[in-house]
Image (cartoon, helix red, strand yellow):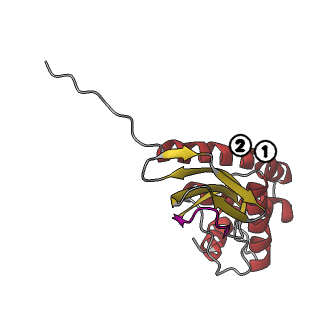
């Protein structure tokens, strides 16, 4: 979703016309808070050769786990050195890592997050604008510093719950 669309939503909520810099700065603050608390996770799946070092994406902060996607099995024979990763064996691997967010530079920039997290960024921006424009400062601060992180954590948990493979059911016929 483009930041300009989020700006329209926030302006409608607070009933104030906003400049682009206010929205960009608030969005960067919200995304930074999410990244620092490791709420953002990304994956890379590729073929790798044994004992070769591979550059991880720059936005990767910390590798959480690695799995063999064909076997759906978590493995522990990999090593990270700085922003490089290597594996003991050849094969296809999926790397899960905490990542920093792409920080918007203009109002046309896209914030590529799960829709549930986009809603949390909108809410944060509502609080951010309320504080900046002295509209119910106390509630704005509460939204920015308490509710935002709690709601992001709940959204992350819900997203993770939806990504788990479905349970297997045993069918009994009479």
User: At x 73% / y 49%, what residue is drawn?
Assistant: 148
Task: Say whether residue 52 is magenta.
Answer: yes
Disc 2 crowd rating (10 Å Cα; few below 14, some 14-19, many 20+) is: few
**Vertically, is 27 above or below 67?**
below
Quarter where residue 102 is shown: bottom right
- The numbered dot on residue 158 is none
User: At x 67% / y 67%, what residue is drawn?
Assistant: 53
Q: Quadrant of the C terminus?
A: top left
Residue 25: x %, y % from top left: 80, 71
Q: Nearer the viewer, residue 48 or 21?
A: 48
Residue 111: x %, y % from top left: 63, 70
Residue 23: x %, y % from top left: 74, 71
Q: Quadrant of the N terminus?
A: bottom right
| Residue 31 in the figure: left or right of residue 96 | right
**Vertically, is 155 above or below 62?**
above
- The numbered dot on residue 150 is 2
Q: Are marks 2 and 1 in contact (CB under 8 Å)?
A: yes
> Under tag 2, what secondary structure?
helix
- The numbered dot on residue 146 is 1
Disc 1 crowd rating (10 Å Cα; few below 14, some 14-19, many 20+) is: few
Q: Magenta part of the protein: which range?
A: 46-54
User: At x 43% / y 43%, what residue is drawn?
Assistant: 165
| Residue 135 in the figure: left or right of residue 162 | right
Task: Say whether residue 7 is magenta.
Answer: no
């Amino acid at each position: 979703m483009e930041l300009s669309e989020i700006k329209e939503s926030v302006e409608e909520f607070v009933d104030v016309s906003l400049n682009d810099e206010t929205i960009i700065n608030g969005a960067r603050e919200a995304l930074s808070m999410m990244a620092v608390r490791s709420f953002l996770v990304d994956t890379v799946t590729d073929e790798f050769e044994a004992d070769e070092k591979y550059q991880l994406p720059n936005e990767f902060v910390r590798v959480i786990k690695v799995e063999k996607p064909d076997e759906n099995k978590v493995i522990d024979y990999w090593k990270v050195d700085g922003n490089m990763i290597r594996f003991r064996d050849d094969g296809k691997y999926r790397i899960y890592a905490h990542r920093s967010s792409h920080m918007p530079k203009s109002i046309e920039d896209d914030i590529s997050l799960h829709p549930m997290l986009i809603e949390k960024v909108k809410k944060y921006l509502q609080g951010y604008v309320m504080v900046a424009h002295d509209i119910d400062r106390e509630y704005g601060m509460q939204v920015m510093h308490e509710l935002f992180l709690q709601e992001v954590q709940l959204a992350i948990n819900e997203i993770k719950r939806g990504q788990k493979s479905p349970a297997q059911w045993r069918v009994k016929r009479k």
